[in-house]
Image (cartoon, coloured by chain):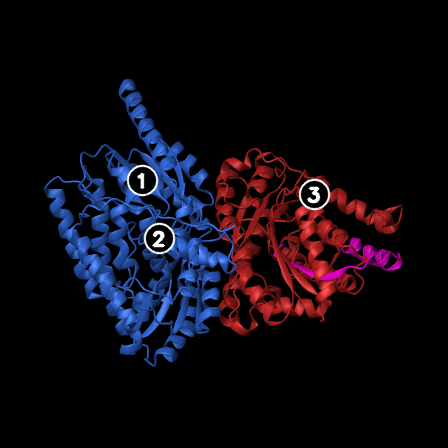
Chain colours: A blue, B red
Amino acid sequence: MTTTIVTPKAAPAKEVEKDASMVKQKEMMAAHYDRLTSAPQTGEKVVSTFVPGNLNELTMCFGLLNNLPEVNAIQNGLRRTSGAFVLEAEKIGHSEDVCTYVKSDIGMMAKGNIAPNGKRFPDPDVLLLSYTGCFTFMKWFELLREQYKCETIMLHTPYMGDGKITPNMIEYMVKQLKDEVIPTLERISGVKFDIDRLREYLKKSATAEDDLVHVLQSAKRKPSPIDAYFGGIYYIGPIFGAFRGTDDAIDYYRFLREEVEARLAAGKGPVTPDGDMGKEKYRLVVEGPPNYTNFRQFWKMFYDEGAVVVASSYTKVGGVYDFGFRHDPEKPLETLAEYCLGVYTNRSLPMRIDMLTNYVNDYDADGLLINSIKSCNSFSAGQLLIMREVEKRTGKPAAFVESDLVDPRYFSAANIKNRLESYFQMIEQKRAATRAAA
Amino acid sequence: MEASLNGSKTATIVARAQALFDDLSFASAREWKAAAPGRKVVGYMPIYVPREIIHAAGMLPLGIVGGGDQLEVIHGDAYYQSYICRIPRSTIELGVSGRLDFVDGMLFPSICDVIRNLSGMWKMMFPNVYVRYFDVPQNYRDDIGGNYYVNELTELMHHLGELRGQPITDDELRHSIAGYNENRRLVRELYSFRAQRPWQAPAAEVYLALRAGLVLPVEQHTEMLRDYLAAAASEERPRRDNCRIVLTGVFCEQPPLNLIKSLELAGCYVVDDDLLLVTRWLTADVPTEGNPLHNLALAFLHQSESTAAKYEPNLKEKGQHLVRAVRRSGAEGVIFACPSFCDPALLERPMLQHVLKDADIPYIAFKYAENSGQMQPIREQAGTFADSIKLWSGT
């Protein structure tokens, strides 16, 4: 039996409205893809690595361009090409049960490895397996290594099972960086490591991180000037991707901060694809990644109801900065270790519960919504307990919807919409009960 | 198998192992704990923990591998989405239903994100139990991964010492290492015996004998293995016209016992497998002289099994452990049996299949859950595989 995925033909699309920062972000990403696909001509070397635990400041010390397979899968999801890639990977033997990021990537390779700009991705010169917060990463890069037959570096980030970073973890990671990661990158790139260059990049990272945190925390205000999930995904793009540690990132986040401050001053809510959001009716915290194949449709279900996401865990998957961590140029390798160890999915379940509870309280949210992703056990296993525990601690209602990252087969618009509508009714009831009790 | 069980020594041993397997209240472990004041039990999940350290603390290491096909999961399903494997939900069921209420500590090894997150859930749900996520290095250099691992082991040893109220000494640990060395030697001997004469040691019996080691004190289990080996060697059993296969992918969530039996009934002798790897994770004796934690760490780095949860730094070496298992055991093919939604097994499978294809080794694949009840499709698939090997191999 074969399955054919048919994407319904949409009516002529209305022009999507974007903040100036979104336009700028899109231009940055496009420029990066152009630089990547031009690498065979320019001679730049390419490192494939992952978003959580990515060491952009370090790889830039060797003049390496980063290529992030999750971001490519997201691009394919947004462009609705991932469904066919997932099927292609399943056709060549990958299980229907496993991560669709992986299968989208493998399927894309099988179909010519074409980047969003229509040009072929270069083969990586090295795979830097930053094994951080996700078991699948390890298998994913073993699968890529099998295809590319290039050198692979493993950087193992221990899991924060006991809710703390120990000296042993830091020492282990620093030793891996010093004795394995850096010497291998030197050999592959032909560039000698310069720790002062790394310090410079780290300093720039910290500046951009300050502005990002300012932007994310602006959602504490009412109305929130940003959507910290759907809009937040645009905001994290540069810093989670190829731009952390660059002047471009500093410029972007300064620009974004000014834009958000202007919205705050004007008392405006977030910009949605359909323009300025109407009255803010519901403030939510969201746990879990979004669905990308129907991203805009998913977002619309929120803003049509006046729901804004004021904090999300997904925007912490490439680094948690809002509890004080900044890349520190004074201890360059230790800070990289600390960064990797602290990313959201490397935190124990009790830590995640504490974090989400804090978000609900600090952002004065109406409750927690979990978008549980079939592909992602790192996020999803345990989310039902998270939901109950956050509900118990905050006294606010929580809800649960299911979808997938980039597999359109697992996005059921009607089911999700029904659940969201019921959830908003629950919030209304809770408010009415609170008013009655007052 | 049934015919050989009438009153024989093998039958007696297997019946005992079967009773331990069937007992979801862990009566033998409870009895062990109740037999002397102050005794403690520490549970652990797949794939590997250094049981020697638990034993050195005078505690009973208790292997928890889910609830199998006899446990009705009522509460456990409320904690997991439909697309997550079965072992965590049945393990939660064991916990919530009070079946593990005598367990003083639980170790959750680094195997996948589901078991990893279960460690945090256990902390929340059973706050009076000592819970540890047991991380192991994915870097195999002595001065990097080795140092990290020694420090992790030191911490575990310290915590278990605190749990019993008295530090664990190096001599206690050396003594335990010696006990587990002996146990692993017998497990290896059993596997070697089965590879040579699989009709004398059916897969289901070998499995039950190994499984008993998850609940018995190591000394008793060693004795059981020795007795089983002697009995199995002395009782002649009919030899079937079966092919010989390696069973792989079964290292975490356990296949139903009926599945293992079905493979042999369908014409496939299991001559090697990756079931219950903790019983033979370390592939050689751990030295009993010198620093015991250092010795355990070196054994882990350089003399341990390969499996999906372990990074293989060398591309050329990827999957070769399976080819070697086939050659060593004289197998004619490989059966991939992977639990549904098992990331490690299912992500690994295509890479292993490519290696087997290059080595010209035939294989088939299917999925199961620990509570799979319908064996007919598996029996048909395995039977067809056995027929195809007999008809076409070597042509």
Residues marked 3 and 2, same chain: no
**Disc 1 to disc 3, C-alpha distance:** 45 Å
Q: Return the mark for residue B29.
A: 3
Q: Quadrant of residue A204?
A: bottom left
Q: Residue at x 73, y 41 (%)?
A: B35
Q: Amino acid at mark 2?
A: Val
Residues marked 1 and 3, same chain: no
Q: Quadrant of residue A428?
A: top left
Residues marked 1 and 2, same chain: yes
Instruction: Report the mark closest to the observer, 3 or 2.
Output: 2
Q: Return the mark for residue A234.
A: none
Q: Residue B243 colored magenta?
A: yes
Q: Up-down: is B212 above or below A54?
A: above
Q: Amino acid at mark 1?
A: Val
- Residue range in magenta is B222-251
Residue A169 or residue A297, whichever sits in front: A297
Residue at label 1?
A285
Q: Up-down: is B385 above or below A283?
A: below
Chain letter for mark 2: A
For label 2, the SS is loop
Horizontal relation, residue A346 to residue A261: left or right: right
For label 1, the SS is strand
Q: Are marks 1 and 3 in contact (CB under 8 Å)?
A: no
Q: Amino acid at mark 3?
A: Ala
Residue at label 2?
A317
Chain letter for mark 3: B
**Disc 1 to disc 2, C-alpha distance:** 15 Å
Chain letter for mark 1: A
